[in-house]
Amino acid sequence: MTNIKHLFFDLDHTLWDFEKNSELTFKQIFKEQSITLDFTEFIKIYSPINFSYWRLYRDEKISKSSLRYKRLKDTFDALNYVITDELINLIAEDYIKYLPNFSHLFEGTIETLEYLKKQYQLHIITNGFEEVQQLKMKKSGISKYFDIIVTSESVGVKKPNPKVFEFALSEAEALPQESIMIGDSYEADIIGALNTGMNAIHFTEEKSKGNDVTSVSSLLDLKQYL
């Protein structure tokens, strides 16, 4: 990976520990709303439902409001927990409001960003909601490392749509061949970047789906390649 000048990172599940922060957010809300559910069981049911709805949202098949409501509605229904639509909508709103207040990062995030910032220009490309991504970065202390922050909402389409990557490259004044995308989603981050002519590194605990794609299981492993 020679002649690389720009590194584009995904945020959630790559730098910012979404699962841990999400669980802490729900714990706060459940306590405030006196929701008497087995929390471990709730997360077990919610996580795959949330993932499936995010895939639909990414593919432009549902709206943001539908995603926020249905992922909760389906989870409570699966647990046979009686709850009003009014309370579901309140939980959905509070979830987005509280989520950035928790700022756990993956191990090695700050050390890795400090190391890379000395050699490259760093940027963010995220499918996350516009109103919370900036807050997540600010409150977790990583905003200062990044020059360009691109959310899919600001572009109007979501990764892996090439328009997101092309927009980010344009904003960063970067060429595809001198850029690398680093992210956890093979479909959204890796395939999207490769289809735009960028290089890519897959952040995953499992073996990467593409044999020709570099993968790391720890952010600190990036030092071996960059």
Image: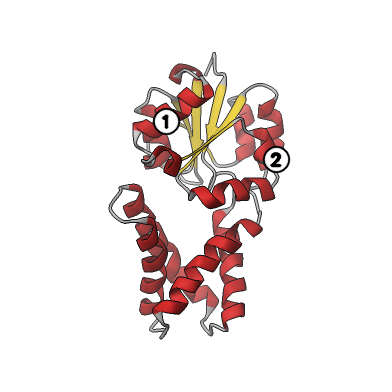
Q: Quadrant of the C terminus?
A: top right
Residue 136 percent coordinates (x, y): 61, 50
Towards the viewer: 166 or 4: 166
At x 32%, y 54%, the residue is 56
In this picture, is 116 found above or below 10? above
Q: CA distance from mark 2 to mark 1?
A: 24 Å
| In this rendering, position of residue 222 left or right of residue 150 | right
x%, y% of residue 115? Answer: 70, 29
Residue 165 shows which numbered tag?
A: 1
At horizontal 38% and vertical 84% (from top left) the residue drawn is 80
What residue occupies the far left of the structure in this picture? 61
Residue 217 picture location, percent across and down = 55, 42
Left or right for 119, reference 73 = right
- Label 1 residue SS: helix
User: How is the model colour-coded?
Assistant: secondary structure
Of residues 159 and 113, the one drawn nearer to the viewer in this rendering: 159
Residue that label 2 marks: 110
Check disc 2 and report its element: helix, strand or loop: helix
Q: Quadrant of residue 69?
A: bottom left
Where 42 falls versus 104 (above or below)?
below
Inspect the image, locate mark 1, and give the three-letter code of the amino acid beneath it.
Answer: Phe
Q: At 50% from the left edge and 19% from the top edge, which residue is drawn? A: 174
Are there few (<14), some (14-19), or many (20+) residues within 10 Å of tag 2?
some
Nearer to the camera, 66 or 38: 66
Q: Is residue 106 visible?
A: yes
Q: Disc 2 vs disc 1: which is toward the camera?
A: 1
Say left or right for 67 vs 146: left
